[in-house]
Image (tube, rainbow, N blue to C red):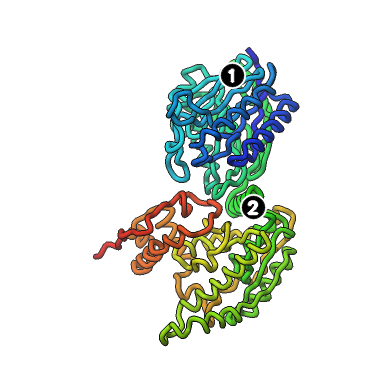
Amino acid sequence: MSQRLVIAAIQANPTVGAIARNESLARERMAEARAAGADIALFSELFINGYPPEDLALKPAFWAAGKAAVERLAAETTADFAALVGVIWPSDVPGVRPRNALAFLAEGKVQGVAFKCDLPNYGVFDEKRVFEPGTAPSVFTWKGVKIGVPICEDIWSPVVCAGLKAAGAEILLVPNGSPFRRMADAERMQVATARVAETGLPLVYVNEVGGQDELVFDGGSFALSAQGEVVMRLPMFEEALAVTTWEKGATGWACAEAPMADWVSGPEEVYRAMVLGLRDYVNKSGFPGVLLGLSGGVDSALVAVVAADALGPERVRCFMLPSRYTSRDSLEDAADCAGRLGVRLDEIAIAPAVDAFSGMLTPLYEGKAPDLTEENIQARIRGLSLMALSNKLGSMLLTTGNKSEMAVGYATLYGDMCGGYNVLKDVYKTEVYAVCEWRNAHNPYGLAADPIPRRIITKAPSAELRPDQKDQDSLPEYAELDAILFGLVEEEATLDEIVARGHAAETVERVQRLLYNSEYKRRQAAPGVKIGPRAFGRDRRYPIVNGFRDAVSKG
């Protein structure tokens, strides 16, 4: 039996469905791990197929391609080097769904396959819909060491790890596909620490990194000693390959050497999640770049900065589309922001189009006074113009609405909601300001220091669709609005609970009404980066036709 085991933690960025690319990436990382002296390499969950595969997991051709890729990779292992690689594994029984699996590759072949037992079916996960659960945990023996391999959700309750301990496991190697959300790193650490305390076994946790549609995987892989001490941390939001050395003593396996990276938190982790999510969405989808409307407001300014940091200024193009209500300050602020970033800014006046629509439609308005209709026409002219530019130039249009606006419907369908992706979709307005302040004080990607003009941050937000318009003419102050929305959306709190926090009953009821009445808009909104625990879309699925309304208790 070996008294020393060198484990390579592979924190890499696969692409869902791109099996040939993922196979090639796995081959490269295996070669690097072997050259670094590793005995075994651990990849993240479903690395070959990409995670989450959603309904791709229902396609037999997809299973077959993944299995064939793993078999080719297995042929490149030796008597001295093995790998644990995540893959969808088809059942031998007709009509039985495939399994979320981890293949053990060694000595030139697939030596065994472990199946995920505990399938998550909450939040963004719906694995019970597409996978058959494993019936028992698996222990693999390599170089005389018994290795337990719980897969992601398998460590979120005691049962699987207890079974691995009973089966003789000496160390736990855990592949994961755990998406970013606020406090995810703390939750993962708490769960892993509990399993270590229960089993007395050291644990190596490897998470994937990268963007996939609305999800961002932040990496943040780590290892715990048998005493629960953190002995390895890999960086967040970037790829890494860490070689960790473990030695067996009288009391079991201990980590003798491993890297210890710093982890980010607060506005920085939100910003890095947005950058990584946008970068991978654009690059993995094959877009040459992005464009957006730069209004001189704080939301579009932050989106422009994120885009420039993610893709480089040469792949970002901005457009100012002023109307008669656009202020001189907004024109100057947009130009200033674009100049600081080094992105191209073009101006397209929309007044001729507004006049054309007025001429077309006014005779049919039957003498009705101007109202929200005319404001929405301006927003829709901008959306139409930007979509035309997206079609002609080939770049993807970014939409710039934040979560506060999306929650209460303070956005125009087919207007400012036009676009292919929204990096602010799960970021409340108050968070937008906090992230702007952080980015102005830091330059994490070496592109532009202090990129957002101070006046953009300090001036009162306005859609500028009518004279002297301010957001707070129609909405509560954002600090109060966001506090109420956090209670309604993130916490599912009752109206009485929110009122007890110091908010007026009529305000809370109004915000609830706006939230529910805007569900039809959110169903038609662009995807965007998940930041919190209850992002609109896959996290929070409310019916559009919904007759339920909570009420504040009377008396």
Foreground residue among 4 and 468: 468
Tag 1 residue: 111
The amino acid at mark 2 is: Val
Where does the N terminus fall, quadrant-wise? top right
Q: Residue 238 occupies which quadrant of the picture?
A: top right
Q: Residues at badges 2 and 1 in contact (C-beta under 8 Å)?
A: no
Secondary structure at badge 1 equals strand
Tag 2 residue: 282
Q: Residue furthest left?
A: 555
C-alpha distance separating marks 2 and 1 = 38 Å
- Estimate the x, y position of residue 198 in percent, counting from the top left: 47, 26
- Estimate the x, y position of residue 95 in percent, counting from the top left: 43, 29
Tell me: 5 left or right of 151. right
- Estimate the x, y position of residue 230 in percent, counting from the top left: 59, 33
Secondary structure at badge 2 equals helix
Q: Residue at x 51, y 36 (%)?
A: 59
Foreground residue among 419 and 142: 419
- Estimate the x, y position of residue 247 in percent, counting from the top left: 65, 20
